[in-house]
Each structure stands twice: as C-alpha cells, then as structure tokens.
Image (cartoon, rainbow, N blue to C red):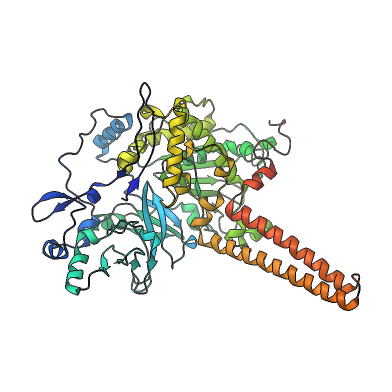
Amino acid sequence: MHLVTQPWAQQVAGSSRVLHARPILPIRQSQLLHRRSNVVIPRTAAPSVEEVAQTSTTGASQLAGHQQPASNNAPAAPKQQHHFQQQQQQQQQQDGSTFSWTKHWWPVTPLSYLDPQKPVPVTLLGHTYVVWFDPKAEQGQGKWRIMEDRCPHRLAPLSEGRIHEDGTLMCSYHGWQFSGSGDCTRIPQIGDSAKMKAACASPRACVASFPTTVVNGLLYAWLESGPAAEAEAAAVTPYVMPELEQSTVKTWGMTEQPVDYTFWLEQGMDPTHANFLHHTCGFPMSDALPMPGEALPKEVDLKGGYLWTHGNYTTKHVDMKAERQFVPPNSLRVVYDRGFVRGFATMGTPVRPGVSRVFFAFVTPPGMKVPLPFKLLGKLPHWVRMGSPLADQDTVVNAKQEAYMRSQGLTTKQYAAFARADQGVLAAHRWFEAAGYEEMWKQRMGSSYIPDSSGSTAEVSSSTEASSNAEVSSSLSSSSSTGVGARYAYKPYLLPQDESFYFDTYERHTKNCAECQAGMKLTQQAADAAAVAAVLLVIAAASLAAAAKTLLSPGVLLCGLLAGGAVWLRGKLIDFRHGQFISSRYRWQKDGGLSLVKGDPIKLY
C-alpha cells in the first residue's frame, strides 16, 4: 500500500457535486494501535524512542503480514451483490475456493531491463513498489527484492534511494536503511545504539517485503507479504508455456500500454484482426480468410481458464490448426501446428485502471529452420530491434475503442459479435466478470478508485466532459512520480485525444528498460562524435585550401565530402534516437497511420 492523493472532479446526473483532492490513507498508515493502552491513536502522535523501547516486543515480521485491527467506525459493507460476487460464491460452495488476484505470481519485468545498482519504481495492481537488487542475499549470490515504495519515516519513495555499500536499501530523504526482508537496520537520527535498535525493531519502522522469483529471465512478484505468504508462494511455480521451455529463443519483450488489462486479453484472443490492423506489417489484407473456430461454453473455469481452438485466417497454410489458451490470471499461450514460428507466449499485468504491462516472447522449436533475415535480426541488440509499428497499431485502436466505450457506458454486450472468430473475446470478458475484476480494483485502491463507466458501475458519461477535463488536468499535475504508468494519469481514456499520447515510447518502454537507456545514451554519443568529426573536417578542409590556395584540391574535396557525410550521419542518428527511444509519432505520420495502407485492399476473399 502507498499514500495516494487523487484529485478529481465528478458530476452526477441530476445534481452537481465536486470531490476535491484528499489523501487516501490505508488503515495501517492512518491509524495505529497503541499496544499499552489498546486504543487507536493518530499517526501524528508518534511515540518517543523510550516508548518504542518499552512497547516494541516484536520485529518486522508482524508488519509483513499486513494484519491490523479493524476500525470500529468502518462503514458497513453494501448489501447489494454484483453478478460476479454471486458467481464467486456459487463456485466457492462447489469447490471451496474463490479467486484471489494477489495470490498469484505476476510478471514484473525482464531481468535484462533492470540495473542492479539502481532501485526502480513499479506499479502492480494499483500499488507502487520498489524493485532493487539485494547483493547479500542467497549466500552472496544476490536476489531481486520487491518492497513497498514507502519509507515509514516520512513516507518518501524508496525508489528514489540508493543501494548502500553494505547491501541495504537507503532512503535518500533521511538515510534510513532497510534489509531485503524489510527490516529497518539503521536510523541515523538516533545516536544511542540501544535506542536505535529498539526503534528499528518496531513494526512501524519496517517495510512490507514480497516474495519474488525468476523464471526464464523474467522477474515475478507474489503480492501478499508475511511468513504465510512466503510459504504459499514457495509452493506455487509460475506458469510457463511448455513450448517456450523447449524454444531455442527465450527473449522477453515488454512494453506498457495506455489500455486496460482486459483489452490485453481481448486482443490476444482475436487473431483475425492481423490482416487488417497489421496490413502493413506482413499481414496483407488480400490474404485474409474467414476463420473457423470452435464454440465455447457460456460458463468459464475461474481458475483453469479456457482453451480455444481455431483454424487458419490467411491463405498461407490453409489447413493450419491453432490453440489459444488463457491460463489465469495473466498468461496467454498461442500455438500453431506449422511455420518456423510455432507460436508465442504473452503475459499481462494490470498497472492501474486503463494501463497494463504486456510481455511477449516468440516460440521456435529446436531444430526448426529459421530464415536468415530473422536469424540476423535476433543477433542485434534489443534496443535496435524493439521499434516495431505493430504495437503502435494495437495501441491506437484499443485506446480509442476503450475511450469510446468508457465515455458512453458501453460493455461487450454492445459488441455485434456474429462470427466464431469472436468466441475467444467474449469468453475473456465472461472470465473477468466471474473473477471480480472491478471488485479487485475497489479492494486494492479503496476510496480512491473511480468506477468504470461500463456495466452496473457507470458514472462517467458523455455529459460529464467538463468534469472529466478537470480530472485530467488534476491527475496530470499530481502523478509525475507514482511509478510505472504515471504518464497516463489516473484514467488514460479521459485524456485529450492527442496522438503523441499513444506514441510516447519513452514512458511506455525506455524509462523501464536499462538496455534501451544504454542504447539511447550510445546513440547520442555517436551523434555528438559525428558533429565533432564534421567540425574537424571543415577545419582541415580550410587549412588545406589555405595551403593549396585553391578549393578544388583533392584533399579539400575529400574533407568536404567527409564533413557532409558526418553531418548527414548525425541527423540520421538523432532521428533514430528520437523515434526509437522517445516517440514513434513521426514514423506513424510518415507511414500515414492506419488510413494509408499498401497493397490491394479490394481483393479480400
């Protein structure tokens, strides 16, 4: 949990009211139990060091469990149940279990994207965490840690801190230090060692730490803390696509999309969009075919997900069979029975409502002959080959689709889904409803959560444009440092439809990838070197011209030619740096966006 200040303005039909900015504090931050008197006291009434020494009889492990006494003044739970709650209760009566969003391994980032010397913020399911490398863990082998991005002293972000030489995470505000388990190890403001030890032992001085694991170069987090969570997480292995385990290439790509998590699965279960949306990326419209697919049952398996089989959707490999399997809550397995790319694995993690983090890896079986261009492409550094327009095409369409649906209060019930090709999409939304997706956000974000306008919680409509603009303005001004997804404010689909918003490569990827940050720096250095070379060549040409008393000598012409080449190279490097690491908007406009397509769009079938 972390401190959230969410300003917004909201207009309710039939009346006018404005909800102003206010801090949203979790119970354990805003109310604390005084152990001696057994009464609830405000955070501002902080005990002295002597009181801490007398009352702190337990360590950080108590805080890690996140168990706090409930307030007697807590509001009563609403009596009305949503459809998904009823379905969860029915399933619980049948198999004795319900779906928990936090008791799963969630992908965080590829390890290659991280810098062991630098803590970084990451937002998962609406909460902000700090990711850092603990060099002292695992008998000196080191371990990646994930903790709450909040120093208990003054609630400053630990992601702005540094890795101390003793292997602890130091807060940059006042120098408090924390071990990988979240225990406070040093408070510089307390000189007496005994008093400092007592203060460090207080649960109030600790930070919640969460289980982590690494599989196939991908860092995962278990979003429950405490000893029980450690044991539970250790008994569960992150799902890995079997075909990926055998693949000769296991390189993950990751980007952050200004699109809600539900649209990630919807897009993954929709193969027939490829020959239309990605017409310019190797999927020509003229190759499109009506796709056969199996019908899926109305009920979905809450924990097991579903498997959908379908046929081919292009003129290539007409008899091809494919499987698309959703493994809750975050894995999509896609397998083809032919082709040198036999499928792909994609995973998703909700960042906040309207923002998702998407992971992608191709599957190539051992011994499969791969065309030479793809072999050479795989040899290039990640920061050279990551700039495909395919992701931009998905983002533009899905973000605008979501913006329209949310603003009008529409749901999948308004989809004109007549074809078997839509079966996977409809099943995905049935699963989200059964799993309590909207309820998860309410639980994770508390009263700071603004319900979506879709379904029974509709609150944002086309008549609230003025209020939405006020919310957007406030959100943009207050969310500059809330970790991953901050660029998109609270509700991305309420932002002005400025194309630059969709193509912000730096916020979507570069800022979260150490490899691309290094590539951006290297490209800038090369551009600077080209500029220096151009200047030196011009000086050399001038010197040779003065000596030869002519501008037409071979040396002068050669230096002039090389200087011009250096200037041209610098321009290309600057353009590459901007388009690859900062914004792909220019490339999108140059290619004509989605409206300009090449080939023969008439002969579809």
* Residue 24, placed above or below residue 385: above
Percent x, y for residue 585? 62, 46
Kindly identify the residue that appears in the image at 16 percent across and 50 percent down.
41
Towards the viewer: 272 or 109: 109
Kindly identify the residue that appears in the image at 21 percent across and 52 percent down.
43
Q: Is residue 591 left or right of residue 291?
A: right
Percent x, y for residue 526? 66, 66
Kindly identify the residue that appears in the image at 17 percent across and 44 percent down.
70
Q: Residue furthest left?
A: 37
Towards the viewer: 139 or 65: 65
Percent x, y for residue 28? 23, 50
- Camera sees residue 374: no
Q: Quadrant of residue 548?
A: bottom right
Q: Quadrant of residue 62?
A: bottom left
Q: Residue furthest bottom?
A: 547
* Residue 561, placed above or below residue 262: below
Kindly identify the residue that appears in the image at 51 percent across and 27 percent down.
417
Could you tell me how many numbered marks the image carries? 0
Name the image quarter holding the C terminus. top right
Q: Is residue 567 left or right of residue 25?
A: right
* Residue 222, placed above or below residue 531: above
- Camera sees residue 317: yes
Q: Is residue 490 left or right of residue 561?
A: left
Percent x, y for residue 34? 13, 54
* Residue 349, placed above or below residue 420: below
Towards the viewer: 394 or 247: 394
